[in-house]
Amino acid sequence: MPVKKMGVKILRRYLYGSLLLIFIVVIFFNLYKYREQNLADLVDINRVEKIYIMLGNKRPEGQFELSKADDETIKTLTDFLSQYKVRLTTKGGYSSDHPSEQFELYLGYEDGDLGLFIFERDIVAGGGIHKVLNPPLDYKVIEKLEQDINSK
Protein backbone atom coordinates (compact mmCIF):
# COMPACT_ATOMS: atom_id res chain seq x y z
CA MET A 1 0.00 0.00 0.00
CA PRO A 2 1.41 3.41 -0.89
CA VAL A 3 2.50 5.63 1.99
CA LYS A 4 0.14 8.43 0.89
CA LYS A 5 -2.97 6.20 1.17
CA MET A 6 -1.85 4.94 4.55
CA GLY A 7 -1.44 8.54 5.77
CA VAL A 8 -4.98 9.40 4.62
CA LYS A 9 -6.39 6.38 6.47
CA ILE A 10 -4.58 7.34 9.67
CA LEU A 11 -5.78 10.92 9.31
CA ARG A 12 -9.40 9.74 8.84
CA ARG A 13 -9.19 7.50 11.92
CA TYR A 14 -7.74 10.39 13.91
CA LEU A 15 -10.51 12.71 12.65
CA TYR A 16 -13.29 10.20 13.42
CA GLY A 17 -11.79 9.45 16.81
CA SER A 18 -11.58 13.17 17.63
CA LEU A 19 -15.18 13.75 16.54
CA LEU A 20 -16.34 10.81 18.64
CA LEU A 21 -14.45 12.15 21.67
CA ILE A 22 -15.99 15.62 21.22
CA PHE A 23 -19.45 14.06 20.88
CA ILE A 24 -18.97 12.06 24.09
CA VAL A 25 -17.71 15.13 25.99
CA VAL A 26 -20.74 17.18 24.85
CA ILE A 27 -23.14 14.42 25.94
CA PHE A 28 -21.55 14.11 29.39
CA PHE A 29 -21.46 17.90 29.83
CA ASN A 30 -25.19 18.14 29.07
CA LEU A 31 -25.99 15.22 31.35
CA TYR A 32 -24.09 16.97 34.14
CA LYS A 33 -25.59 20.40 33.46
CA TYR A 34 -29.20 19.14 33.36
CA ARG A 35 -28.85 16.64 36.21
CA GLU A 36 -31.21 16.40 39.15
CA GLN A 37 -29.75 18.14 42.18
CA ASN A 38 -30.61 19.08 45.71
CA LEU A 39 -31.87 22.66 46.09
CA ALA A 40 -29.58 23.29 49.07
CA ASP A 41 -26.59 22.33 46.91
CA LEU A 42 -27.80 24.57 44.08
CA VAL A 43 -27.74 27.65 46.32
CA ASP A 44 -24.46 26.47 47.93
CA ILE A 45 -25.96 26.77 51.41
CA ASN A 46 -22.77 25.60 53.14
CA ARG A 47 -21.02 28.89 52.30
CA VAL A 48 -23.85 31.23 53.39
CA GLU A 49 -23.21 33.82 56.10
CA LYS A 50 -26.02 36.35 55.58
CA ILE A 51 -29.66 36.01 54.56
CA TYR A 52 -32.50 38.26 53.51
CA ILE A 53 -35.94 36.96 52.48
CA MET A 54 -38.44 39.08 50.60
CA LEU A 55 -41.96 37.61 50.43
CA GLY A 56 -44.30 38.17 47.47
CA ASN A 57 -44.71 41.83 46.72
CA LYS A 58 -43.60 43.01 50.19
CA ARG A 59 -40.83 45.43 49.28
CA PRO A 60 -38.87 47.15 52.04
CA GLU A 61 -38.92 50.91 52.10
CA GLY A 62 -35.52 52.15 51.02
CA GLN A 63 -32.50 49.90 51.16
CA PHE A 64 -32.29 46.64 53.03
CA GLU A 65 -29.40 44.85 54.64
CA LEU A 66 -28.64 41.16 54.76
CA SER A 67 -28.78 39.79 58.30
CA LYS A 68 -25.97 37.73 59.78
CA ALA A 69 -27.42 34.23 59.92
CA ASP A 70 -27.10 32.25 63.12
CA ASP A 71 -26.58 28.49 63.08
CA GLU A 72 -30.24 27.76 63.82
CA THR A 73 -31.45 29.89 60.89
CA ILE A 74 -28.96 28.26 58.52
CA LYS A 75 -30.02 24.81 59.72
CA THR A 76 -33.72 25.62 59.24
CA LEU A 77 -33.07 26.96 55.74
CA THR A 78 -30.83 23.99 54.90
CA ASP A 79 -33.48 21.51 56.10
CA PHE A 80 -36.13 23.32 54.06
CA LEU A 81 -34.09 23.48 50.85
CA SER A 82 -32.70 19.94 51.22
CA GLN A 83 -36.12 18.37 50.83
CA TYR A 84 -36.50 19.63 47.26
CA LYS A 85 -34.92 18.36 44.06
CA VAL A 86 -34.49 20.59 41.01
CA ARG A 87 -33.36 20.25 37.42
CA LEU A 88 -32.16 23.00 35.08
CA THR A 89 -34.53 23.63 32.17
CA THR A 90 -33.90 25.12 28.76
CA LYS A 91 -36.44 27.90 29.38
CA GLY A 92 -35.23 31.42 28.88
CA GLY A 93 -36.64 34.33 30.83
CA TYR A 94 -38.69 34.21 33.96
CA SER A 95 -42.39 34.92 34.31
CA SER A 96 -44.39 34.44 37.47
CA ASP A 97 -47.22 31.92 37.40
CA HIS A 98 -47.91 32.01 41.17
CA PRO A 99 -47.04 35.52 42.44
CA SER A 100 -48.79 34.91 45.77
CA GLU A 101 -46.29 32.13 46.53
CA GLN A 102 -43.19 33.89 45.29
CA PHE A 103 -40.24 34.90 47.43
CA GLU A 104 -36.76 36.20 46.84
CA LEU A 105 -33.83 34.81 48.76
CA TYR A 106 -30.72 36.96 49.00
CA LEU A 107 -27.67 35.07 50.22
CA GLY A 108 -24.38 36.59 51.31
CA TYR A 109 -21.50 34.15 50.97
CA GLU A 110 -18.26 33.83 52.96
CA ASP A 111 -16.19 35.26 50.10
CA GLY A 112 -18.38 38.36 49.79
CA ASP A 113 -20.41 37.19 46.80
CA LEU A 114 -24.14 37.87 46.73
CA GLY A 115 -26.66 35.39 45.37
CA LEU A 116 -30.25 36.20 44.40
CA PHE A 117 -32.72 33.39 43.92
CA ILE A 118 -36.38 33.81 43.02
CA PHE A 119 -38.56 30.95 44.21
CA GLU A 120 -42.08 30.04 43.31
CA ARG A 121 -44.25 27.02 43.83
CA ASP A 122 -42.49 25.00 41.16
CA ILE A 123 -39.49 26.95 39.85
CA VAL A 124 -36.26 28.50 41.00
CA ALA A 125 -34.54 31.26 39.04
CA GLY A 126 -30.97 32.24 39.68
CA GLY A 127 -28.36 31.23 37.16
CA GLY A 128 -31.11 29.66 35.05
CA ILE A 129 -34.67 28.41 35.40
CA HIS A 130 -34.84 25.25 37.51
CA LYS A 131 -37.94 23.08 37.71
CA VAL A 132 -38.79 21.81 41.18
CA LEU A 133 -39.24 18.07 40.76
CA ASN A 134 -41.25 17.58 43.96
CA PRO A 135 -43.40 20.74 44.15
CA PRO A 136 -44.90 22.74 45.67
CA LEU A 137 -42.45 24.58 47.91
CA ASP A 138 -43.88 24.96 51.41
CA TYR A 139 -44.50 28.70 51.52
CA LYS A 140 -45.53 28.65 55.20
CA VAL A 141 -42.04 27.55 56.27
CA ILE A 142 -40.51 30.51 54.42
CA GLU A 143 -43.04 32.92 55.94
CA LYS A 144 -42.08 31.73 59.42
CA LEU A 145 -38.35 31.90 58.63
CA GLU A 146 -38.75 35.42 57.26
CA GLN A 147 -40.55 36.50 60.47
CA ASP A 148 -37.81 34.92 62.59
CA ILE A 149 -35.06 36.70 60.64
CA ASN A 150 -36.80 40.08 60.76
CA SER A 151 -37.58 39.82 64.49
CA LYS A 152 -33.89 39.55 65.42
Image (cartoon, rainbow, N blue to C red):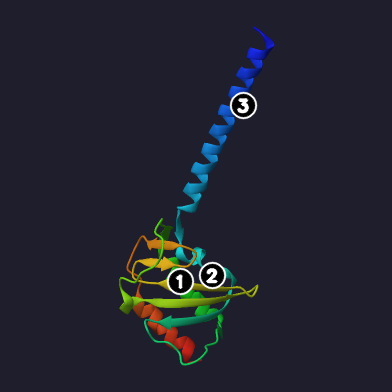
- The CA span between labels 3 and 2 is 45 Å
Q: Is residue 150 left or right of residue 48?
A: left
Of badges 1 and 3, the one in the foreground is: 3
Q: Where 58 sits versus 98, above or below?
A: below
Dot 1 and dot 2 residues touching (CB under 8 Å): no
Mark 2, residue position = 45
Residue in view at x 42 percent, y 57 percent: 87
Label 3 packing within 10 angstroms: few (<14), some (14-19), many (20+): few
Looking at the image, is mark 3 or mark 2 earlier in the sequence? 3
Secondary structure under tag 1 reads: helix
Q: Earlier in the sequence, mark 1 or mark 2?
A: 2
Task: Say the numbered circle drawn on residue 79.
Answer: 1
- On the image, the x and y values in percent for residue 40 come to 49, 67
Q: Amino acid at mark 1?
A: Asp
* Mark 3 residue type: Tyr
**In the visual, does 29 lie left or right of 113?**
left
Report x, y in % for residue 112: 64, 75
- Label 2 neighbour load within 10 Å: few <14, some 14-19, many 20+: some
In terms of secondary structure, where does tag 3 sit?
A: helix
